[in-house]
Image (spheres, rainbow, N blue to C red):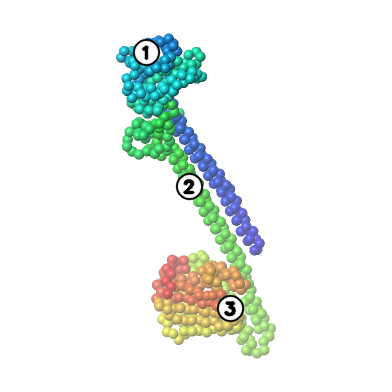
Amino acid sequence: MRIAVLAKRFTLWVGLAAVLVPLTILLALQYRWLWELDSFSERAHRAQVESLLEAVSKNVEYFYTDAGEVLDLQPAVFTQGQLERAAHLFKKKGVRGVSRLFVMSLRDEATEPLYFSPSCASFVPPDGSPEARAISVAVAPWKALHRKDGILERVRLFVEEKDPNFRILLYPITDDSSRLVGLAGMVLDEAYFRSHVLPAAIRKALADFSEGGSEYKPIISVQDGQGQVVYATDSSQDPWKTEARHPFGFVFTDWTIELASRHATAADVARRNFVVNMGLSVALSAVLLAGLALALRTASREMKLSQMKNEFVSNVSHELRTPLASIRVFGEFLRLGRFGDIGKAREYGDYIETESRRLTQLINNILDFASIESGHKTYQFERRDVREVVCETLKTFEVRVRQSGFRIRLEGADVPLPAARVDAGAVAQSLSNLLDNAVKYSPDGGDITVILRREDDFIVIAVRDQGIGIPRDEQSKIFDRFHRVSTGLVHDVKGSGLGLAIVQHIVEAHHGRVAVESRPDEGSTFSIYLPVDAPEPAGPKALAATGSRERPTEA
């Protein structure tokens, strides 16, 4: 039977593992998937943001690259002195966003830049202004290159930003042999850049961004070289959260484009969704595990209860056979006349009566337990002298105690006790169960002391033995039905496992309590506390065992 029980328990643990292992694997896979999704979403959002900022920078570059096409003059303008053609071209195209256009021929080292005057559509000499000095500084390296007969393999638009107040675009002009013959340039108008170029570049980038189906509505701002915001798509003063910064790549390279969001960013939303989804998964798993644990606990308890019932049946069978066998033997002795004298016959009769009472007590316990389980157990209350009930119980138990080698001592018999409202038969049954346990679990015989006393508002019936005692961790379980201490000599003693459960039920029906004091190898003391003034029963003479009762506080 033990092997079968262990097999069942092992099956339960295998079932638990069969659920836990796949669930753990699923949680791990889901965590990894959610983490990868969150990481991918963040990378995708970052790429999206960088692409948007790069688009703004490119739009600015495209604007000034297109404007710089006007500087692509023919070499003849410089080699043949045809500056009027350049003046005519500048006037015709009317470049926007430029504060000054200029050209410079490199045929003569003493030549200075000439400035285009829109009013007269011609070039004029420098005026000594800060702007003119900035232009002179910008063209100086090109003069040096010309003196060294420098050759340009690739001609493109160059940006000069040594002086942030005067940002210059230069276009070198080369002849057929790639030798530098002149320069054409423009000074950018920063005010125009702020008021026209930036807004247009940002609007176009946002429009292209929205066409991609994105619902993300960012805030784009531009900061100058001193960190001052010179433009923003949202002019309110509410704070925003910066997501990314990107410098301009062609011109105004010391300026920064900043992308921000006033609300949660896409990365924040993805991260929050990750936390929420993972939390829900963990919560659902916890609920599933709790349900599984509850089911396993219930199954384990049912298995344990089934095992206890099996042991109960086995023990009760043994308990029934023992007194029946004694009754049959002594009955046969009497029937066959195998006794020497009338005294021996009376002794046999005492044995038969004792075993009959023992059998009756066992059957009463079983029947009472059945009544308690079905909720039909009732008690007949009347005012009785508890001392009288105790003495009558000890008298009926005397023969068995004497036969087992024990002595019963009654203490407190002379102490005056008030009458109490009790069910005399139930109290006698409780005391009998305690005495029966004292005999069973005191293998070496000795004294069993029954103590009567009054303690506050309670009449106390205590049974003290010199038996094997009860471990502290078992003392809270011994009143459970079918429970039997699983270690030591206690487990080797046959019993139904119902005696103390019935004692507790009877005492609680009297609105009392049962207390135990015990140490291993030092004996045990069980005390029944019966209230002196018990509440009136639920019916005229009966109290249902299933009624809700309030247990008195321990004295």
Which quadrant of the figure contains the C terminus?
bottom left
Mark nearer the N terminus (1 vs 2): 1
Q: Position of residue 156 (x, y in %)?
A: 46, 20
Mark 1 highlights which residue?
87
Residue 318 shows in this picture = yes
Q: Position of residue 135 (x, y in %)?
A: 38, 22
Q: Is residue 410 left or right of residue 82?
A: right
Query: 416 or 187, which lies in front?
Result: 187
Residue 67 shows in this picture = no
Q: CA distance from mark 1 to mark 2?
A: 72 Å
Secondary structure of residue under mark 2: helix
Which quadrant of the figure contains the N terminus?
bottom right
The answer to which image quadrant residue 404 occupies is: bottom right
CB under 8 Å between discs 2 and 3: no
Mark 2 highlights which residue?
279
Amino acid under label 3? Ser
The mark found on residue 99 in the picture is none
Question: Which residue is depicted at the point 52% across and 84% down?
Answer: 409
Q: Position of residue 406 (x, y in %)?
A: 58, 83
Q: CA distance from mark 1 to mark 3?
A: 128 Å
Question: Which residue is depicted at the point 52% across and 65% down?
Answer: 373
Amino acid under label 1? Ala
- Relative to 367, say whether 393 is above or below: below
Image depth: mark 2 or mark 3 in front: 2
Mark 3 highlights which residue?
442
